C-alpha cells in the first residue's frame, strides 16, 4: 500500500485503488468519493465508463475473462469490488460474473500481491431470515436466490484466500443503498450514500481487517442485523432512515403478513423467479 495504516501521521491515502463495477449505481456514487483518497483511481466495468477525469484510469474488463482481470490487478494497492451481476436473474450470467469472476479477481490479487479487498456482498446472503429476527455475521447463510448464493460463494472464497494466502477482505452485506428508503422494509435495510462511503473507507483503512463480514446499513431505528463483531473495522454510521419514516408509512400504511416479501428479510427477492429483476 502507499501508506502505513498504523501511522496516524502519514494521512489516509493510497497510491492506486481499483474500483470494479464503476459504471453501476453504487460505482457511480463512489467514483468521485474514492478519488479523494488515492493518487490514481483505476475504474473498470463492461458498461460505458465515460471519460477519464484527472487521476483516473479506465480499464474495461469482463470479470469472466481471466487474462483481462489479471492485467486489471497489476500495480493495485487495494480493491473495492462492486463488479458483477447485482440483481436476481438467470443462473448462467450470475455464474460467469459473480462466481467465475470473483475467482479470477482473487487469483489475480494473489499473483500481484494485493493485500486488501473490499467485497460488495449483499443482504440477500441471509434473505430467508425473518423480519422478526436479529442476526449476526456468525449465523448460517440463508440465500434467497441465485444472486444471494453467488455472494455467499464470494464470502467463502475470500475466506479461503485469507486463510491460505493472507489476503484481507471486508465483505459488505449491503442493504438498500438509495437516496431515500423506497418502502417500509428499507426502513431497516437503508444505507445512505454518505454511510456507504464511510463503510468502504473504514474497511480500506482499518489497521487490521482479517476476514470480516459487516452488514451495510445506516443507524436505523429498526434493526435486523447486529454488527457488534465488526466493530474493529471502525465503521460508525451517521445517517438514519428515521426522517423518512412518516412519509414511508403513509405511502405503505398496511402490510400483508401472509406475503413472503413482508415475512422475510430479503423482501421481494424471496419470491422472484430467475428471470425477474428487483431493487436491493
Image (cartoon, rainbow, N blue to C red):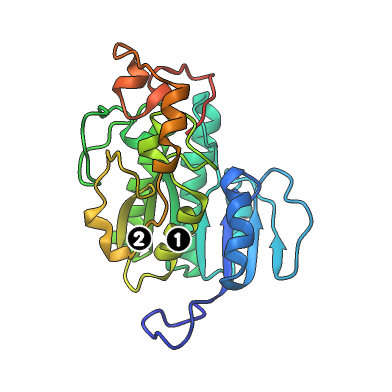
Viewer-side residue, 95 vs 268:
268
**Residue 55 in the figure: left or right of residue 194:** right
Residue 140 occupies quadrant: top left
Q: Position of residue 223 (x, y in %)?
A: 28, 40
Tell me if mark 1 has few (under 14), some (14-19) or many (20+) residues whose alpha carbon lies within 10 angstroms of its own: some
Viewer-side residue, 113 vs 190:
190
Which residue is found at the position 27% from the left and 36% from the top? 141
Cα distance between the residues tagged 1 and 2: 8 Å
Which residue is found at the position 70% from the left and 64% from the top? 57
Which residue is found at the position 44% from the left and 46% from the top? 191
Q: Position of residue 122 (x, y in %)?
A: 41, 41
Residue 236, numbered circle: 2
Residue 173, numbered circle: none
Q: Earlier in the sequence, mark 1 or mark 2?
A: 1
Decide if residue 71 is in sight here: no
Q: Position of residue 231 (x, y in %)?
A: 26, 61
**Residue 134 in the figure: left or right of residue 124:** left
**In this figure, which residue is indicated by the disc labeled 1?**
198
Q: Secondary structure at mark 2?
A: loop
Q: Position of residue 109 (x, y in %)?
A: 48, 62
Query: Is the C-beta separation of discs 1 and 2 under 8 Å?
Result: yes
Q: Secondary structure at mark 1?
A: helix
When the figure is inspected, residue 245 is found, relative to residue 217, above or below; the finding is above
Residue 259 occupies quadrant: top left
When the figure is inspected, residue 7 is found, relative to residue 68, above or below; the finding is below
Point out the residue furthest to the right here.
Answer: 51
Point out the residue furthest to the bottom here.
Answer: 9
Amino acid at each position: 500500500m502507499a501508506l502505513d495504516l498504523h501511522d496516524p501521521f502519514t494521512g489516509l491515502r493510497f497510491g492506486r485503488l481499483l474500483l470494479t463495477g464503476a459504471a453501476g449505481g453504487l460505482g457511480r456514487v463512489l467514483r468521485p468519493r474514492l478519488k479523494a483518497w488515492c493518487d490514481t483511481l483505476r475504474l473498470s466495468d463492461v458498461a460505458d465508463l465515460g471519460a477519464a477525469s484527472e487521476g483516473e484510469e479506465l480499464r474495461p474488463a469482463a470479470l469472466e475473462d481471466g487474462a483481462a482481470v489479471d492485467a486489471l490487478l497489476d500495480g493495485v494497492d487495494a480493491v473495492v469490488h462492486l463488479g458483477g451481476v447485482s440483481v436476481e436473474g438467470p443462473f448462467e450470467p450470475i455464474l460467469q460474473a459473480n462466481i467465475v469472476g470473483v475467482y479470477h479477481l482473487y487469483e489475480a490479487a494473489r499473483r500481484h500481491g494485493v493485500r486488501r479487498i473490499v467485497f460488495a456482498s449483499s443482504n440477500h446472503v441471509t434473505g430467508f431470515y425473518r423480519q422478526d429476527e436479529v442476526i449476526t455475521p456468525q449465523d448460517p447463510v440463508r440465500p434467497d436466490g441465485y444472486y444471494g448464493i453467488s455472494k455467499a460463494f464470494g464470502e467463502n472464497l475470500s475466506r479461503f484466500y485469507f486463510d491460505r494466502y493472507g489476503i484481507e477482505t471486508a465483505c459488505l452485506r449491503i442493504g438498500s443503498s438509495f437516496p431515500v428508503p423506497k418502502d417500509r422494509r428499507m426502513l431497516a435495510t437503508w444505507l445512505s450514500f454518505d454511510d456507504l462511503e464511510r463503510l468502504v473507507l473504514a474497511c480500506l483503512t482499518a489497521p487490521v481487517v482479517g476476514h470480516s463480514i459487516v452488514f451495510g446499513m445506516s443507524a436505523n431505528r429498526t434493526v435486523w442485523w447486529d454488527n457488534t463483531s465488526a466493530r474493529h473495522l471502525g465503521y460508525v454510521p451517521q445517517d438514519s432512515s428515521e426522517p423518512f419514516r412518516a412519509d414511508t408509512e403513509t405511502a405503505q400504511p398496511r402490510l400483508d403478513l401472509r406475503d413472503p416479501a413482508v415475512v422475510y428479510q430479503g423482501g421481494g427477492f424471496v419470491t422472484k423467479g430467475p428471470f425477474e429483476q428487483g431493487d436491493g
